[in-house]
Amino acid sequence: MKKAIFKNFIIILLLALILSGSIFSLVISNVLSRNTRQNMLNILHILDETLDYDKDLKGQIDQLTLLYENSKARITIMDIKGIILVDSNISDYVNMENHIDREEIQQALREGKGAARRKSGTLNISMLYVSYISRQGDYILRIAMPFSGLWDYVLILFPAILMSLGVSLIISLILANRFSRTITKPLYEISEQLLKLQENNPEFSFKPYEYFELNLIADTTKRMADAVKESIKKIEFEKLIRQEFFTNASHELKTPITSIRGYIELLENGMATDENMKLEFMGRIKKEAQNMTELINDILMISRLETKEVEVIRTDVRICSLINELIASLKPLAAENNITIEMSCKPIVISANHGQMRELFNNLLTNAIKYNKPNGQVKVYVTTEGNDAIFIVEDSGVGIPEESRQRVFERFYRVDRGRSKKLGGTGLGLSIVKHIVNYYNGTIELDSKEGRGSKFTVRIPMS
Ligand code: ADP
């Protein structure tokens, strides 16, 4: 890249120099050529003033041309009809042809002065001719000088052009080098920073650069690198959570399996001496198997909610009749501790997955009964607030200590492990509730007073 910048810089510079050099040379040459013509005209002017046309013209001219010998100037004087009266370079001027039709003479006859450039028929070199009509009488004066065009001046200017080319080339080489470094160095630095992504805990440091675009690249790179870092962290965190989940799940499954095996061994070894004992062991095996089924169902539910792969079918769910159904099915559980359930329900219909809604209310209601006190109360409110559906499940139970209030929504977290297990809890209920609420872009709040009861408030936008 540095090389490419360098090369392009030099090419542009050379082009600019050649172009400006050519224009400059042309303009200067033009000015010089105009000056030469003016000088030649001045000479003729002075000559006309000093010449005595009545005396020997050849003698006077020869004397004067001594002064111009070096400049190779040729002076010709003719009468108004073009007949040569004298020529400084040709002695046999009497026989020279009539000059009246020469371009510069014709112009002088029209305008008082004239100029032309052409190859001299007499001397066979390119010449510049300037002519002038005498103010003293009917004479035409003409001066001619070798002149091969603008190139004469270009050649004079050439060393200067060459020198300025050289100097600007050196300066621009230095500048191009410095310029390309101001671009390539930051890019190297940025890529070096990017390499840090391979490190374990990369810390990026980007300097501010001279150019806005480079800062933009640095900034975008930093943001991208941060985002990559963040998602790596997230992936690692999720991996950890998943691992933890599997460890916990297998642990949770192991417990009922161990006790089932224990009871079976007791039965096999004939430890159940009477029929009643046998029945009790069988009953316990059945209960553990039920717990396992529940646990597996909850695990499946969580994994379905997490992967979000399964298409969730939504229907119009009548919340009040769903809750009524659930309360009816939970009556036996509530009756065990003489718990009363009150309900105040605004008859709303929301578009949701019936199974998920059932799971949500079932978990909240079951917990409100399970973690209640004997003769306790459970209150259910369903109402709306603006566009939100509000579900409140309140109990007068054991409550949740402050430090556990956030954690109860974690998977397998239980405040009182023994109590939860005894009541057939899996530790996944509230975690499932939270997942479902999140799925519907809702929120869940928990208010609780230890020993006095808990209140769960769910808010779900209806559209
Ligand atoms: P579990 O299957 O153990 O009930 P949950 O996820 O439903 O699992 O609840 C997690 C823990 O939160 C429970 O073990 C219990 O300690 C506590 N908890 C949940 N609901 C209530 C409640 N209404 N009153 C008191 N504690 C509760």
Image (cartoon, rainbow, N blue to C red):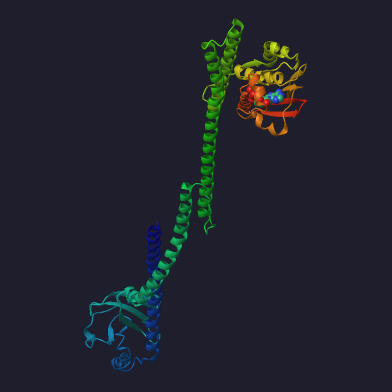
Between residues 19 and 433, which one lies in front from this camera angle? 433
Residue at 77% x, 18% y: name it. 376
Picture coordinates of residue 318, whole percent (x, y): 67, 15
264 on left or right of 86: right
Residue farthest along the top direction in this orientation:
275
Between residues 367 and 359, which one lies in front from this camera angle? 367
Q: Which image quarter: residue 55?
A: bottom left
Q: Which image quarter: residue 79?
A: bottom left
Classify the position of the C terminus by image quarter: top right
Between residues 327 and 228, which one lies in front from this camera angle? 327
* Relative to 390, residue 8 above or below: below
Asked if residue 459 can be seen in this view, the reply is no
Q: Which image quarter: residue 411?
A: top right
Residue at 64% x, 16% y: name it. 317
153 on left or right of 426: left
Asked if residue 306 can be seen in this view, the reply is yes
Classify the position of the N terminus by image quarter: bottom left
Between residues 379 and 74, which one lies in front from this camera angle? 379
Picture coordinates of residue 257, whole percent (x, y): 53, 19
* Relative to 162, residue 290 above or below: above
Picture coordinates of residue 123, whole percent (x, y): 23, 80
Picture coordinates of residue 15, whole percent (x, y): 38, 63
